[in-house]
């Protein structure tokens, strides 16, 4: 079990990436302003992130190769960046 007490999104993501099957990224700078508090089981990272999405001002976009966190207000920008990156 990992425990984070009021940590910024980037701090939580850095810790989770040590155990996650897919890389997790903070997809926009304003998402790093979100403080996340909670406990997570190593084998339940994606489920835990889904729970964070329910209570924090962040959303999660999961693709086959990564999980991106972004603030709700920047969701369109993140989707557009992901689409253009995939078109290259």
Image (spheres, grey):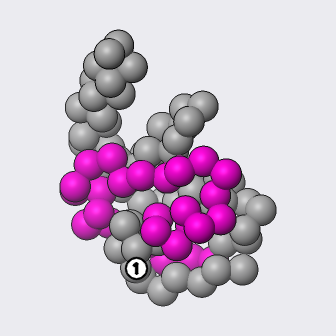
Q: Is residue 23 magenta?
A: yes
Q: Quadrant of the N terminus?
A: bottom right
Q: Is residue 17 magenta?
A: yes
Residue 45: quadrant of the picture: bottom right
Considering the numbered disc 1 on the image, is that residue within a helix, a strand or a loop? strand
* Residue 84, image x, y percentages: 29, 19
* Residue 77, image x, y percentages: 23, 32
Question: Left or right: 30 with respect to 40?
Answer: left
Query: In the image, is residue 85 above or below residue 53?
Result: above
Q: How many marks?
A: 1
Query: In the image, is residue 68 above or below residue 41?
Result: above
Query: In the image, is residue 73 above or below residue 63?
Result: below
Where does the magenta region start and end?
A: 13-39
Residue 86: quadrant of the picture: top left
Q: Quadrant of the C terminus?
A: top left
**Residue placed farthest to the top in the image?**
87
Question: Left or right: 11 with respect to 37?
Answer: left
* Residue 32, image x, y percentages: 29, 63
The one nearer the camera, 7 or 81, is: 81
Tell me what residue is drawn at x 40 percent, y 79 percent.
Answer: 7
* Residue 67, image x, y percentages: 51, 44
The one nearer the camera, 17 or 47, is: 17
Question: Left or right: 62 with respect to 41?
Answer: left
The residue that label 1 is drawn on is 7
């Amino acid at each position: 079990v990992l425990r984070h007490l009021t940590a910024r999104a980037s701090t939580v993501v850095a810790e989770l990436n040590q155990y996650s099957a897919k890389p997790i990224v903070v997809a926009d700078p304003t998402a790093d302003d979100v403080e996340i508090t909670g406990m997570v089981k190593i084998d339940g990272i994606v489920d835990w992130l889904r729970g964070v999405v329910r209570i924090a001002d962040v959303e999660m976009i999961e693709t086959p190769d990564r999980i991106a966190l972004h603030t709700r207000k920047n969701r369109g920008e993140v989707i557009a960046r992901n689409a253009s990156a995939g078109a290259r």
